[in-house]
Image (spheres, grey):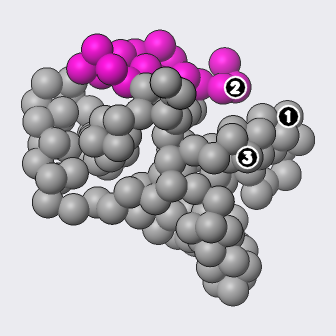
Amino acid sequence: MSVLEFADTNIVVYAVGQDSDKHTKARQILAEGVTVSSQVINETVNVLTRKQGVNIVVAHEVAESLLDLCEVTPVDESTIREAIRLVRRYKLSHWDSLIVAAALLAGCETLYSQDMQHGQLFDEQLKVVNPFF
């Protein structure tokens, strides 16, 4: 059985960014065919346009590439309910809990993220890996 992997927004942003070390590693992760949620795609567009000054057309091209390259899971009612449970159990922010919930519901075992605690295990299933650690 293959290990399913999920990428957080920061991995995608580094994949299109200028930091050569992080850029290379992030692109390798995405090339593996990871899972992302609709939240990750939307956050990526927001970060690229609002924080990095990328043109909306280019940001949408990145979003479309993610749609083609990755398995995309929706953020729906079950994701929100799971996120609420995770906030209560692990004291995560709401936005981080939505990422973790989407990864858990997709059956992933690895969550690539720079924003969460490296090595943290959620529900004895999902391990956070900071690939830049």
**Magenta segment boundaries in residue numbering:** 118-133
Q: Position of residue 113 (x, y in %)?
A: 53, 34
Main secondary structure found in the magenta portion: loop
Which element type, helix, strand or loop, lies under badge 2?
Answer: loop
Q: Position of residue 38 (x, y in %)?
A: 41, 63
- In the rendered image of this protein, does residue 11 appear above or below residue 2? below
Which residue shows up at 16% across the image and 42% down it? 82
Residue 21 disc label: 1
**Quick one: label 3 or label 1, which is nearer the N terminus?**
1
Type of residue at label 1? Answer: Asp
Q: Amino acid at mark 2?
A: Phe
Instruction: Check disc 1: other Cα within 10 Å, few if <14, some if 14-19, many if 20+.
Output: few
Residue contact between numbered discs 1 and 2, judged by CB atoms under 8 Å = yes
Q: Nearer the viewer, residue 57 or 65?
A: 65
What residue is shown with label 2?
132
In magenta stretch: residue 84: no
Nearest to the observer: residue 54 or residue 44: 44
Report x, y in % for residue 107.
35, 35
| Horizontal arrangement in the rendering, residue 26 relative to residue 121 (left or right) | right
Q: Give, as a three-letter code, the residue at label 3.
A: Ala
Number of numbered discs present?
3
The residue pinned by badge 3 equals 31
